[in-house]
Amino acid sequence: MEYVYPVRIYLDNAATTPVVPEVIDVIVRCLGEDFGNPSSAHRLGLVAAAWVKRARAQLVDALGDGQIVFTSGGTEANALAILGAARRGRDATVVVSAVEHPSVLGAAEKAGRVVSVPVGADGVVSAAAMADAVGPDTTVVALMLVQNELGTIQPVADVVRLVRAKNDRVHIHCDAVQAIGKIHVSANALGVDSLALSAHKLHGPKGVGALWLRKGVSVAPLWTGGGQEGGLRSGTENVPGIAGLGEAVARATASLDDDAARMAHLRDGLVAALVAATGARLNGGAAPRAPHIASLSLPGVPAEPLLHAIEERGVYVSAGSACHAKGAAKKQSHVLAAIGVPDTAGTIRVSLSRLTTSDDVDAAEHAIIGAMRDLAQLLP
């Protein structure tokens, strides 16, 4: 009997997540009834300021004691940390892993000289290699916690320990955009100076994020103005977005253990089925990983036609990071190149969320296997 596919199954949650109703309710309240400018001294301003204060407290509860600077998203938070720390001196040198997010790599290039540290075939950088790359002129070290294409977890705390022993003046930044709400994150336990997050990766709105700064750490603002956010991010605060971010973080971290276990179970079952049926390779498979991401290279089928064939069956996945230009399926990402995946391999990224069901995963399994088989008959 022919399999009947659902209308739409969304498994591209590493790109963005649907906003949950509880977060929407908070956003609508701040767009409507509580619409004031948080810098205003009257009642409506004080109410708006209270929403910002509430969100700030929610992020501190989730991440640990520190300064919260609200931004337009993860990209700006990464830029503020890297460029803001690099501006403390001249001729900055930034040490990064070879699999950092494009926003980190772009900020590092703007800051000065970039030292890129290779990763192993599992997509994980050696903590010793990161520390070895640090010299007396190093200003910033940037290392993400969860790799956004592979889901692999990087040894951030080990890197911090080794780097501090070598050069304790270095600012150490962590892009934790794919980690919050998926694994336990304590910024203070990691030992980093700064940490970036974004709302739309954990069922919050797009266009808002935050930078966590360790107490006593200073960075230079990227621009000046009215002095909001402790002078580090001038401009009227996006109160609906900030309130939505706080609510999303609070909800994601409250149910993290149960959600992570269920996502990992569903992901592992899907990966096992695809490997058995298609000969797919799980990229970075030997490394510790977050529960929601799987990158699979499929033999003999280019990524772009495979993605379209899967979508025709009502299932949405991706070729990799959504932050690359459209058409990324035609060009191998720097992450896959860094771990030695042949550019002839068709690679897809399947990413789950806490809303993903077993029916969703069953549909994805049928869609991917069916698309592979159909394309194998059409391609030479």
Image (cartoon, rainbow, N blue to C red):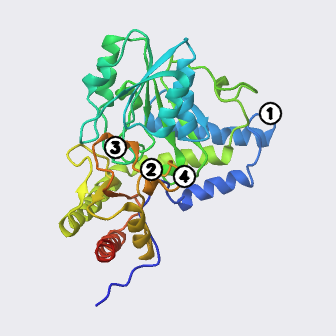
Give the residue number, with chain letter if any, for mark 1: 41
Residue type pointed to by label 1 = Ala
> Which numbered disc, 3 or 2, marks the residue that appears first in the sequence?
2
Where is residue 10 drawn, in percent x and y? 44, 66
Give the residue number, with chain letter if any, for mark 2: 321
Q: Residues within 10 Å of mark 1 (few under 14, many from 20)?
A: few
Mark 2: which secondary structure?
Answer: loop
Give the residue number, with chain letter if any, for mark 4: 204
Q: Does residue 308 appear left or right of residue 300 in this picture?
A: right
> Would you say the residues marked 4 and 1 are in contact, meaning their CB atoms lie under 8 Å apart?
no
The answer to whether residue 67 shows anywhere in this view is no
Give the residue number, with chain letter if any, for mark 3: 337
Q: Residues within 10 Å of mark 3 (few under 14, many from 20)?
A: some
> Would you say the residues marked 4 and 3 are in contact, meaning their CB atoms lie under 8 Å apart?
no
Where is residue 248 drawn, in percent x and y? 51, 50
Q: Nearer the viewer, mark 4 or mark 1?
A: 4
Q: Nearer the viewer, mark 3 or mark 2?
A: 3
Mark 4: which secondary structure?
Answer: loop
Q: Where on the picture, by quarter, is residue 25?
A: bottom right
Residue type pointed to by label 3 = Ala
* Mark number, residue 219: none
Q: CA distance from mark 3 to mark 2?
A: 14 Å
> Which numbered disc, 4 or 3, marks the residue that appears first in the sequence?
4
